[in-house]
Image: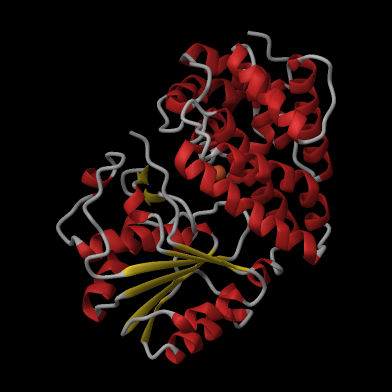
Amino acid sequence: MARFTLPRDIYYGKGSLETLKTLKGKKAIVVVGGGSMKRFGFLDQVVDYLKEAGMEVQLFENVEPDPSVETVMKGAEAMRKFGPDWIVAMGGGSPIDAAKAMWAFYEYPDTTFEELITPFNFPELRQKAKFAAIPSTSGTATEVTAFSVITDYAKGIKYPLADFNITPDVAIVDPVLAETMPKSLTAYTGMDALTHAIEAYVSTLHTPFTDPLAIKAIQMVFEYLPASYDGDKEAREQMHYAQCLAGMAFSNALLGIVHSMAHKTGAVFSTGHITHGLANAMYLPYVIKYNAKTPEAMARYAEIARAAGLSGNTDEELMEALRAKINEFNQKLCIPKTLKEFGIQEEEFKEKIAAIAENAVGDACTGSNPRAITPAQMEQLFTAIYYGKEVDF
Ligand code: FE
């Protein structure tokens, strides 16, 4: 038996934030990040709508990027004191991810992260509260996914949480909130969404339920991301929906090694953080070439290329056309072609790559990649990305 899970309701369109007025409940806690939602007035709007719904409202503010275990525990504690029957999380991926974990510890104070990280092993949520998620960036799609990532800074590890219990009840996809994204964030989150859709489409766990969502998301990203990057509001709106469709696909079909590689290289180099979406965009064309050595994956990439209106006489030509299209996008979006160009020092790369490759193979996203990979192959792949070499192994 297979399962396909989405939020019960997805409200979308300009002004859809207003739907908060119709939530039924007594108390709502609003979980939010560092201040842009407040600065642009969206936080006040949310509070006003919830009050209009007859609810008592409390705020939990300042969730940091890459939210910590401590923040999650503090939030859960605030929830236990206040006793909300709605958790409303708004912002980029981080406050929504944090609120998902807070929800688990609110309902089950005695659980531990060690228990929660076993995939699809959560206790039954919704005993105390329901969950509404409102994204302000167009990429992570955490408003519709079964995932959350929490960082234990003391132990230096990330807890990837995965369970359909944390798929929100309500997602509000209001493009007005994403209009204020800076240009680079638009590029990185947009390429993250494209990677979600492509990895979900070729995933070993793809299904007839996830395929159409992935294909439509890919078509929309190809159509709208360049104009969205240039600030076109209509295109930004379409990108906000496209990333959500990609999220529905990958929440159910899972991802692949582009994400494994991005996860394990994000914070390991002394020269600075590699933003998630940028890492995905940079690695994607190389990984496609690697995966396409298996005929099944080659055929799937060719299907994507055909659906995107690209041309080629053979599956291989179509797969190459898809890679060329992604490279063209990366160039337009000022995304470097190689890790060297990004600024990673050669000495440090050589020193760390064996351990990184090993970690990337062990990442939770590797299992659903269409082609298996050994640590040695992973190291070869990273080396190709470092120097911009052809992938032919
Ligand atoms: Fe991602």
Residue at x 45% of width, y 23% of height: 361
Give the colouring mode of the picture: secondary structure
Farthest top residue? 393
Quadrant containing ligand 1 reads: top right
Where is 313 relative to 182, above or below? above
Residue at x 33% of width, y 57% of height: 101
In the image, 218: left or right of 372?
right
In the image, 227: left or right of 294?
right
Instruction: From the viewer's side, name the closer residue of 119 and 212.
Output: 212
Residue at x 65% of width, y 59% of height: 240
Q: Is residue 274 visible?
A: no
Q: Is residue 233 visible?
A: yes
Quadrant holding the N terminus: top left
Q: Quadrant of residue 67?
A: bottom left
Q: How many marks?
A: 0
Residue at x 74% of width, y 22% of height: 319
Where is 115 relative to 305, above or below? below
Where is 128 relative to 333, above or below? below
In the image, 37: left or right of 143?
right
Residue 379, percent from left and from top: 55, 17
Residue 122, percent from left and from top: 25, 49
Q: Quadrant of residue 331?
A: top right
Quadrant holding the C terminus: top right
Residue 220, percent from left and from top: 73, 48
Instruction: From the viewer's side, name the closer residue of 46 and 249.
Output: 249
Instruction: From the viewer's side, name the closer residue of 211 and 339.
Output: 211
Residue 381, percent from left and from top: 60, 18
Instruction: From the viewer's side, name the closer residue of 344 and 239.
Output: 239
